[in-house]
C-alpha cells in the first residue's frame, strides 16, 4: 500500500564534507517528486539515505508511520530502479521480475500470476523467456521497472533511470514510467539532472544546490515564477539585468538599468520585488525590434544565429551582454542598434541576492 515519505532536517556527510544540510521534504501518497540539479548537489545522496545505503548524521526519515532512519536497507520494502538496470544476467525476464516476490516467499502460483500480469503491463509478454543480453536498453529498463513495481512497494525510487538511453527512447520511457506510476498510485522519488525529464514526469520538482532545496514547486510555477536568480538561471532565464526602481509612471514603474538607460515596466505585467532588483528573461523574452520602438532596452546587436524558429542575437546593453530573439521575416544586421522589448510571459523580476 502506497505511503507518504517525510524527510525532516536531514544532514549528511562524506567524511568531513557536508553533502546535505538541514534538508526537509514531504511527498504525499501517490505523488511523484523529482530531485533536480547538477552533479554534487546532493540529490543522489538523498535517494541513498531513503534507500538505506547511507545513514544521516542528523534528522529523521519516515515512510507513512514507520521510522526508516536506522532501519537496514533490506527491511525498508522500497522499489528501486537504477541507471544501470541492475538485472541478473543469468536469469530470464520472468525470473528477474519475480526475484523480489521469491525473496518474500510468495507461493509459486501467486508469484507466477503477478509476474505474468506485470510483464504484460510493461509490454514484454513475448520476451518473458529472454535473458538481459538479448534485450535492448529500453526493454531492460522495462524489466527493471516491472521488477520494482511487482512487489507493490509503498515507495518507488528512480536513480537517473533514463540516462543510458538514446533521446527518443528517453521520451518514450518517461511517458511509460509516469503511466505505470499513476496507474499504481505509487508514491515516487525520482532523481535526474535533466530538466525536461523532471518537468514532464513530476507532480512537483525540487531544485537542489549545495545540499539544500532551493525551490520546491510544480513544474509550471518553477518555469514561470522562479523564486531566486539561481533557480531562474537553472530553468532557462539566461539574461540577468540589474535594475533600480526610481519612480512611478502612472500604471508602470520606471526603472533605471545599470549603466543609465530607463525602461517602464507595466504594473499589470510585472511586480517589482524591491527597490533594487534583477530583470530576468529567456532569449525569447526579449524581442529584437527597430531602434525607434517605445518601451524596450536599447542595444547594439552582435553575432546573429539562425535557430529555426527565429534569429538569435548576442546584444550589448547598458546592463551587460544579453541574448535575444528576433523575427525570421526581418533579420537585423550585426552592429546595428535595436530595442529589446520584454515579453512578460518569458520574463520575471527577482530580488537581488546578498
Image (cartoon, rainbow, N blue to C red):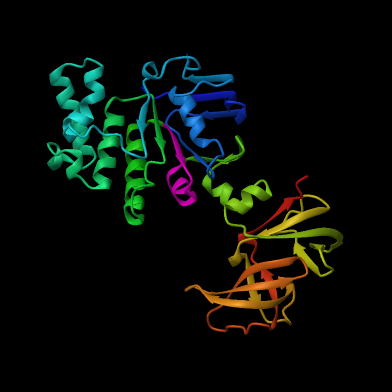
Q: Quadrant where the N terminus lies?
A: top left
Residue 108 drawn in magenta: no
Report the magenta residues as a range.
188-202
> Between residues 267 and 151, which one lies in front from this camera angle?
151
Left or right relative to 222: residue 338: right
Examine the rendered structure and indicate whether residue 64 appears above or below residue 214: above
Q: Is residue 196 magenta?
A: yes
The answer to whether residue 346 of the structure is visible from this angle is yes
Q: On the image, which quarter does residue 290 sit in?
A: bottom right
Q: Is residue 119 left or right of residue 306?
A: left
Image coords of residue 233 (percent x, y): 62, 53
Quarter that holds the C terminus? top right
Rendered location of residue 145, percent (x, y):
30, 36
Q: Determine which quarter of the picture holds residue 94.
A: top left
As drawn, is 297 to the left or to the right of 260?
left
Image quarter of residue 311: bottom right
Residue visible at 65% across and 48% down in the picture: 230
The picture places residue 346, in percent across and down from the top left corner, at 61, 61
Residue 226: tell me if it is visible: no
For the image, the number of numbered tags is: 0
**Between 320 and 343, which is closer to the camera in this rendering?**
320
The percent coordinates of residue 334 (x first, y second) are: 64, 82
Amino acid at each position: 500500500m502506497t505511503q507518504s515519505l517525510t524527510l525532516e532536517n536531514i544532514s549528511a556527510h562524506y567524511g568531513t564534507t557536508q553533502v546535505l544540510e538541514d534538508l526537509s521534504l514531504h511527498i504525499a501518497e501517490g505523488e511523484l517528486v523529482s530531485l533536480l540539479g547538477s552533479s554534487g548537489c546532493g540529490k543522489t545522496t538523498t535517494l541513498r539515505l531513503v534507500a538505506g545505503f547511507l545513514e544521516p548524521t542528523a534528522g529523521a526519515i519516515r515512510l507513512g508511520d514507520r521510522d526508516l532512519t536506522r532501519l537496514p536497507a533490506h527491511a525498508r520494502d522500497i522499489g528501486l530502479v537504477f541507471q544501470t538496470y541492475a538485472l541478473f544476467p543469468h536469469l530470464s525476464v520472468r525470473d528477474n521480475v519475480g526475484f523480489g516476490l521469491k525473496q518474500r516467499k510468495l507461493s509459486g502460483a501467486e508469484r507466477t500470476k503477478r509476474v505474468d500480469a506485470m510483464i504484460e503491463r510493461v509490454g514484454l509478454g513475448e520476451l518473458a523467456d529472454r535473458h538481459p543480453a538479448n534485450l535492448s536498453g529500453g526493454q531492460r529498463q522495462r524489466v527493471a521497472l516491472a521488477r520494482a513495481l511487482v512487489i507493490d512497494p509503498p515507495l518507488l525510487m528512480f536513480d537517473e533511470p533514463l540516462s543510458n538511453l538514446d533521446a527518443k527512447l528517453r521520451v518514450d520511457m518517461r511517458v511509460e514510467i509516469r503511466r505505470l506510476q499513476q496507474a499504481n498510485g505509487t508514491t515516487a522519488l525520482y532523481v535526474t539532472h535533466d530538466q525536461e525529464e523532471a518537468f514532464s514526469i513530476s507532480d512537483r520538482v525540487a531544485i537542489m544546490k549545495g545540499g539544500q532545496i532551493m525551490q520546491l514547486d510544480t513544474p509550471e510555477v518553477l518555469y514561470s515564477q522562479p523564486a531566486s536568480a539561481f533557480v531562474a538561471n537553472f530553468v532557462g532565464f539566461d539574461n540577468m539585468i540589474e535594475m533600480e526602481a526610481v519612480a512611478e509612471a502612472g500604471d508602470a514603474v520606471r526603472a533605471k538599468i545599470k549603466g543609465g538607460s530607463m525602461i517602464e515596466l507595466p504594473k499589470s505585467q510585472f511586480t517589482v520585488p524591491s527597490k533594487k532588483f534583477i530583470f530576468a528573461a529567456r532569449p525569447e523574452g526579449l524581442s529584437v525590434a527597430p531602434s525607434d520602438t517605445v518601451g524596450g532596452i536599447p542595444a547594439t546587436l552582435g553575432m546573429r544565429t539562425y535557430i529555426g524558429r527565429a534569429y538569435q542575437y548576442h546584444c550589448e546593453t547598458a546592463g551587460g551582454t544579453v541574448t535575444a530573439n528576433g523575427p525570421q521575416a526581418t533579420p537585423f544586421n550585426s552592429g546595428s542598434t535595436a530595442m529589446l522589448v520584454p515579453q512578460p510571459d518569458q520574463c520575471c523580476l527577482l530580488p537581488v541576492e546578498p
